[in-house]
Amino acid sequence: MVQTSIAMTDKDREILRQKITEQILKYEQDVKDTEAMTEPVKPENSLGRISRMDAINNKAVMEVSLRNKKSKLSKLKLAITRIDEPGFGSCSICNNMIQAGRLMYMPESTKCVRCAGR
């Protein structure tokens, strides 16, 4: 299939590398903060029945958030290891270049907008 955009320049890669590094640091801190909020609700806490149920519900929500943050962190770490590979920035489905704006917004993207929407 024919490439529809220009490959990334070295300057683009460096800007993207810096953005990914910043996001990795942010997500590592977010994971630590969220882990602290997913600790078990201790029965000895003096909460009423409704408050305890609310605390347990909040814990479940935070666990989902933690899984999502860990997943994003893992994808960002993979992206930073692959940034210098020749195929980085190519869609994993159609092999066209992923739009630069998409990579700047979601550096972990492996699909172009068109293929991701399918």
Image (spheres, rainbow, N blue to C red):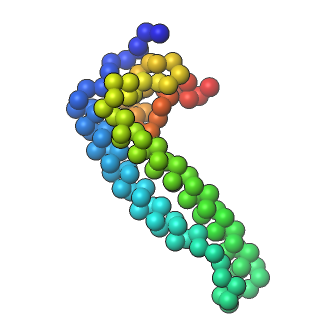
Q: Which residue lies furthest to the left in this view?
A: 11
The answer to whether residue 104 shows anywhere in this view is no
- Front-most of residues 2 and 48: 2
Q: Is residue 49 left or right of residue 114?
A: right
Q: Which residue lies furthest to the top in this view?
A: 2
| Residue 40 against residue 60 in the figure, above or below | below
The answer to whether residue 40 shows anywhere in this view is yes
| Residue 27 against residue 78 in the figure, above or below | below
Place of residue 107 in the rendered image (x, y in percent of width and height, measured from the top left)? 41, 38
Place of residue 5 in the rendered image (x, y in percent of width and height, measured from the top left)? 37, 17
Place of residue 78 in the rendered image (x, y in percent of width and height, measured from the top left)? 42, 41
- Front-most of residues 33 and 104: 33
Residue at screen point 44% across, 39% down: 108
Residue at screen point 51% across, 18% down: 94
Residue at screen point 36% across, 56% down: 25
| Residue 49 against residue 30 in the figure, above or below | below
| Residue 28 against residue 58 in the figure, above or below | above
Asked which quadrant contains residue 17, the reply is top left
Asked which quadrant contains residue 85, the reply is top left
Residue at screen point 42% across, 24% down: 90
- Front-most of residues 107 and 73: 73
Query: In what quadrant of the picture does the C terminus appear?
Result: top right
Count how many numbered circles sit on residues in the image: 0
Asked which quadrant contains residue 47, the reply is bottom right
Place of residue 106 in the rendered image (x, y in percent of width and height, measured from the top left)? 44, 39
